Image (cartoon, rainbow, N blue to C red):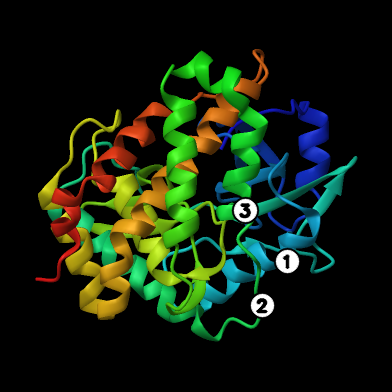
Amino acid sequence: MAVYTQLGAEELAALIAEFDVGELVMAKGIAEGVSNSNWLIETSGKHGAATRFILTMYEYRIELEDLPFFLSLLDHLAAKGCPVPRTIHDRAGGLYRTLGEKAVALIEFLPGVSLGDPTAAQARAVGQALAQMHLAAADFDQARANGMGPAEWHRLAGECGPQGFAAIDPDLAGIVEAELQFLTAHWPSDLPQGVIHADLFPDNVLMLGDVVTGLIDFYFACTDLIAYDVAVTHAAWCFGADGRSFNPAISAALLGGYDAVRPLSPAERASLPVLARGAALRFALSRAFDWINTPADALVVKKDPMAFVRRLQFYADPDNAAVFAGS
């Protein structure tokens, strides 16, 4: 989440009036993230009670034709009992509206906090919630290709180029080239597929104590290898922020929680070391691209690509494959 586009109070009030949620009381920009502009919205509510929502303006990496998939998925998962925010439809029943050339959507606000230092019990709950989401999405009747899959990794690497990578780290270009070659040769294609979140970082999970109250920010959701989603979540949760330290207790709890709800097949588990290398490279590349191209005046927190290069190097070490072994 972030704020690239500035909207005035009158524009925001007029936009919120298109939804049956009461009048705008407060709007606050949210700085975290890199792909969309977001505001925390508070309204008077339909019956006078204050109500909170998240207003999202889609800036880039999201195509307008993909919005029905993202927003309908939220409604589908919420109806299945998953802790995800519902889409607030406008007065005409629309999933989103347009403001100028950009689309905007209003999403239910869920209680909870994002964790900076999760416990093993909390990691287990996240694994369970991820597996629950995968099962609940099995009968979702829409599909979307992964726009951040291997083909995009190659494109991002070309866009960054040797000079761009060198501005981040002198060894980065060589690391990326070698890893792209490895993943092209070893990426699995015969594992179970389904709808995945593809971005389940700690800041996209809300918790109260050991209970998951919200899985949010589904704007990279797609149809892909289900085990890849486990690998993405593992890379996001099991390391220190800078990628230098690995937490085996969090790893075991996360994978154990997932297996308790949707057991990984032997083939899926055996593929996790390669899938995790792909997950780490994906985020290293998107962060590198953003590091190079984010406008200096954008209200955005830029993220260090090398934090995921370090994860990549961890996963590439054969001695560390045992972290994915079954219990």
Type of amino acid under label 3: Ala
**N-term-proximal mark, 2 vs 3:** 2
Residue nearer the viewer, 183 or 66:
183
- Quadrant location, the N terminus: top right
**N-term-proximal mark, 3 vs 1:** 1
Residue nearer the viewer, 110 or 248:
248
* Mark 1 or mark 2, whichever is nearer to me: 2
Type of amino acid under label 2: Gln
* Mark 3 or mark 1, whichever is nearer to me: 3
Q: Which residue is mark 2?
A: 142
Q: Position of residue 85 (x, y in %)?
A: 52, 60
The numbered dot on residue 151 is: 3
**Mark 1 in CB contact with mark 2 (< 8 angstroms):** yes
* Secondary structure type for disc 2: loop
Q: Residue at x 59, y 28 (%)?
A: 290
State the separation of the CA atoms marked 2 and 3.
22 Å
Q: Which residue is mark 1?
A: 68
Q: Is residue 119 above or below residue 78?
A: above
- Quadrant location, the C terminus: bottom left
State the separation of the CA atoms marked 3 and 1.
23 Å
